[in-house]
Every structure is written in C-alpha cells, then in structure tokens.
Image (cartoon, helix red, strand yellow):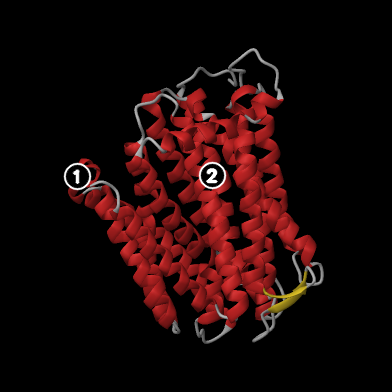
Amino acid sequence: MRNLQKGDKKLLNAWAFYDWANSVYTLTIASAVFPIFYEALFSEGDHYIHVFGMNLKNSALISFVTAMAFLVVSFISPLLSGIADYVGNKKSFMKFFCYLGALSCMGLYWFNLENIYVGLAFYFFGLLGYWGSLVFYNSYLPDIAFVEQQDKISAKGYSLGYIGSVILLIINLAMIMKPKLFGITGTDGEAAMKAMRYSFLMVGVWWILFSQYTYYYLPKGSKKTGQKLSKHIVFNGFKELKKVWALLKQNIPLKRYLGGFFVSSMAVQTVMLVATYFGAQEVKWASKEEGTIGLIICILLIQLVAVLGAVLTSRASAKWGNIPTLIVINMVWAVLCSVGAYFVTLPIHFYVMATVAGLVMGGIQALSRSTYSKLLPETEDTASFFSFYDVAEKIGIVIGMCVYGIIDQITGSPRSAIVILGVFFVVAIFLLRRIPKKTILDQ
C-alpha cells in the first residue's frame, strides 16, 4: 500500500492530510492560546522581565525571539531546499522537523518565568520545526501529483488545515472556559492556565499522531540525480536565489512589485503575529477570564471572516485587476493600523477591528502570491522564483518584528508600534503604484 504511483488519490490525500496535522501550531501556538498564556504569566501592570542582561518588555522580548527564529528559517530554507531536491530520504528530514516542532510545543507546558530561557528555547524550536517541515512537505508536491492535480490538492490541504486547527482551538476554548468539566481543578484563574498548558500538549500530540497517516503513504523520496550530497548541492539554493536577483534587474514590473510586496508583507505578517499581544495589553477587558475568551473568539472570528475575504478579493481582482485591488487592501490596512489600532480601547472596538482585519487578511496573501505568479517571466524554473518569494517574506517578518519590538520597548506601548506599521502600508501603496500601467491593465 505504501508504494503508490504518482497521482494516486490515496497518496494525494495522505499528503494533504499533513496540513490537518500541522496547522494546529499556527492557530493555537502562534496566534491564539500561547500569546494569551504568555501575557497572563506577567502580573497586572508589570510587563517587564530581566533577561539577556536587559530589562525587556514581555511583548518586545517575544517579538525579538520570533524575529530571530524567522532569521534562522530564512537562512536554512534555501539549504533545506537544496537538500530536498537531491537526497533520497527527504521523509526522514521532514519527520525530524515535524517531531522537533511538535515536541517543542509540548515543552511549552513547562513554560514559566523562573526558567524563561528554557521556555523561549521551546518556543524558538517550535517555530523552527514547523517551517522546516514545510520545506520538505512542499517539495513533495511535484513528486506525488501531476501538474493538473497540484492546484486542487494544494487547496484541499489548506482546507483540511483550516478545519483541523479550528476544531482543536474550539476544544481548547471549551477547556479554558469550563475547565472543571474536563477534570481540571483549581481556582478559576489557575484552572484556566492549566487548561492552556494542556492545550500545548494537545498540539504536539495532534501534530505527531495525525502526521503518521501522511508518513505511511509518502514515498521515502527518490534522488533526482546520481550525485552524492555535496557542498555544491547544499548551497545550490543560495545560488538559485542569486540568479533570481540578477534576473529581477531585467524585469522592472516584477522588481517593483516585489518591493511593494516585501513592505506590505512585512507589515501584514507582523500585525497578525502581535495582534493577540496587543489585544491582551491594550483592550480594557472586564476581567482576565473575559479577556482570555474574548481574544480566542477574535482569532476564530478572523479565521471565519478570512474565508469570505478571500472570495471577495478574488472577485474584486477579476473585475478591477490584481494591482488596483492590492492597493485598496493596503489602504484598508493603513487605516486599521494608523487610526483603528490607535483608538481601540473597548472589546467591541477590538471585535470590529478583528472583523475588518479578517476580511483584508483573507485576500491579501492569496492575491499577492497569484499576482507574483502572473508577473513571472516565461520559465520552467518557477521553484527558484517562489523560493526567492518565500525568503523575502520571511526576512520581511524579521524586520517587521524587530521594528515592532524596538518601538514597543522604547515607548512601553504597542500602539505606537502599530501606527508605524501603518506607515509601511502607505509605502507599499506608493511602490505598487509605480508598476507600469500596462502591467496593471494586463492583470
């Protein structure tokens, strides 16, 4: 049963199912429960901790650790891509990063301020494991699916990931709201914190358990050449990135678009990564319990509205073109950050902001990638161009998180940092408007 032919339905479904397994990381750890748990560790009004020889604000600290993790990811991704193209045991590499990420998520159960370095290490390696496994997971697509099957099965993977992550988050939300129903004892606050710790264990178990179905059917991986793994092969990914950079000088529309995408993505990804920390610190919740439940509900709301946003964005781009639609979306983001985020104080404000953010978030990422695809030159080497795209996106996150962390640390408030991110959207609009008019009409 394991030696299935390329294009086999069972093989395709097994590949897509890895999204079901790993997407719980992005929702529970990166977006919802862990940020709330991390914020709750700090006493009311005291958001600072002495770490790495400095007195850092908690949200600035986690921003810097996230930036460092993405910096490592942006460096190792081309290396792993080169390895994935040549080694015959890519499944072993995928498993390594999968288990690294899953076990690190489980390690967050012991996260506390007394052993902050160990906790931050678990957080760091969780992120590294997630993104590292994706490099090999994505590299399997052309191996297991024919060209005409790839879009459909890729979309199916995304859908499975969305459904699986939302299911687990709803279970976690129920545990946090009604811990005694799940046998979790203690005062309301203590029980809720225990429930959040259990959710980290559940993410790791879920990730490892459901990935086994994928590993059962995925082939070990076959070498594409007869070469042994060498220094040349390992660093081939960087050579491909350098080649794409040189080609950009000859493609003005693509070069200008990438500039706009880089700045826009830098701001979008940063806002989404810090949104829960912002909501926990700046919104006046009636109680900690209301804040915990409210923030998780906001994350779920964003996920649901994002689906509608993706549909509306697709229709808008079909009618008015990709670039004009992206410009409008960036305008909405600029208003959200520069005006909306600065005046948000009440839960209802945050709910409204989350709804609008979900609408524009759902479309901007998919539309950005499809626009990039349309602007690519005639070439069969699309993998190198998309590798460049992914690395640019990750480096943007590094810069965005560092900017946010520095401003948050200096001012003591994330509001000023969010406003500065709004300026990035204005810059992105300016860069997108510089793309030649003929290109805009062709989109």
Of residues 18 and 345, the one drawn nearer to the viewer in this rendering: 345
Structural distance between the alpha carbons of marks 1 and 2: 28 Å
Q: Callout 1, which amino acid?
A: Leu
At horizontal 66% and vertical 73% (from top left) the residue drawn is 58
- Residue 198 sits in which quadrant? bottom right
Residue 388 versus residue 39 in the image, above or below: above
Picture coordinates of residue 109, whole percent (x, y): 73, 62
121 relative position to 5: left or right: right
Secondary element under disc 1, as helix, strand or loop, is helix
The image shows a total of numbered marks equal to: 2
Residue 430 versus residue 130 in the image, above or below: below
353 relative position to 80: left or right: left
Question: Mark 1 highlights which residue?
Answer: 441
Badge 1 crowding class, 10 Å Cα cut-off, few under 14, some 14 to 19, many 20 or more, is few
Q: Callout 2, which amino acid?
A: Val
Residue 124 versus residue 93 in the image, above or below: below
Look at the image and tell me whether residue 35 can be seen: yes
Look at the image and tell me whether residue 10 can be seen: no
Picture coordinates of residue 430, whole percent (x, y): 33, 59
Picture coordinates of residue 1, whole percent (x, y): 58, 20
Seen from this angle, which residue lies furthest top? 226
Numbered tag placed on residue 80 in the rendering: none
Picture coordinates of residue 210, whole percent (x, y): 60, 41
At horizontal 60% and vertical 15% (from top left) the residue drawn is 225
- Residue 304 sits in which quadrant? bottom left
221 relative position to 337: left or right: right
Secondary element under disc 2, as helix, strand or loop, is helix
Quarter holding the C terminus?
top left
Question: Mark 2 highlights which residue?
Answer: 391
At horizontal 48% and vertical 29% (from top left) the residue drawn is 12
